Amino acid sequence: MQNIRSLFIALAGITVFAAMALFTVSITLAVGAILTVLMAARAISLRMKPAPVHAKTKTNGQREMRIWNDGRGTIIDL
């Protein structure tokens, strides 16, 4: 009777350990997948953001006129 009880307790312990290990691995994979998706979305959104284009015009003896495009429209600074 004592051997059967010891065997049952050992099997229960192994089962609990295996369940906790499986739970830990699944949580780790879920967090890794979420972080991967967030990093990919951030990389794609930064790549799609237009960079401002700066252009300078020179006039004869007058103050320099600045023209640039910030991605939303052309800005002319007289």
Image (cartoon, rainbow, N blue to C red):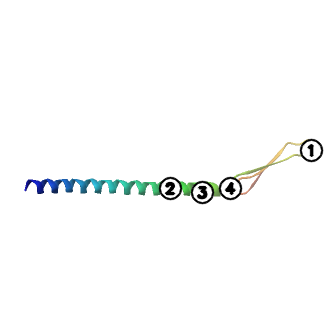
Q: Nearer the viewer, residue 74 or 55?
A: 55
**How many badges with numbers are in the image?**
4
* Amino acid identity at mark 3: Ser
Q: Indicate the position of residue 7 as horizontal and vertical percent values.
A: 16, 55
Q: Nearer the viewer, mark 3 or mark 2?
A: 2
Q: Indicate the position of residue 33 as horizontal and vertical percent values.
A: 46, 57
Q: Quadrant of the N terminus?
A: bottom left
Q: Nearer the viewer, mark 1 or mark 2?
A: 2
Question: If you read the primary sequence from the N terminus, does the residue marked by circle 1 or circle 2 appear first?
Answer: 2
Residue 77 can be seen in this image: no
Q: Nearer the viewer, residue 13 or 56?
A: 13
Q: Residues within 10 Å of mark 3 (few under 14, many from 20)?
A: few
**Disc number at residue 50?**
4
Q: Residue furthest front?
A: 3
* Amino acid identity at mark 4: Pro
Which residue in the protein does label 3 denote?
A: 45
Taking 55 as reference, is 62 left or right?
A: right
- Which structural element holds mark 4? loop
Which residue is at a point 19% across and 53% down the rendered structure image?
10
Q: Nearer the viewer, residue 72 or 10?
A: 10
- Which structural element holds mark 3? helix
Which residue in the protein does label 2 denote?
A: 36
Q: Residues within 10 Å of mark 1 (few under 14, many from 20)?
A: few
Question: If you read the primary sequence from the N terminus, does the residue marked by circle 4 or circle 2 appear first?
Answer: 2
Q: Residue furthest left?
A: 1
- Say whether marks 3 and 2 touch (CB < 8 Å): no
* Amino acid identity at mark 2: Thr
Question: If you read the primary sequence from the N terminus, does the residue marked by circle 3 or circle 2 appear first?
Answer: 2
Which residue is at a point 42% across and 56% down the rendered structure image?
29
- Say whether marks 4 and 2 touch (CB < 8 Å): no
Between the C-alphas of marks 3 and 4, the distance is: 10 Å
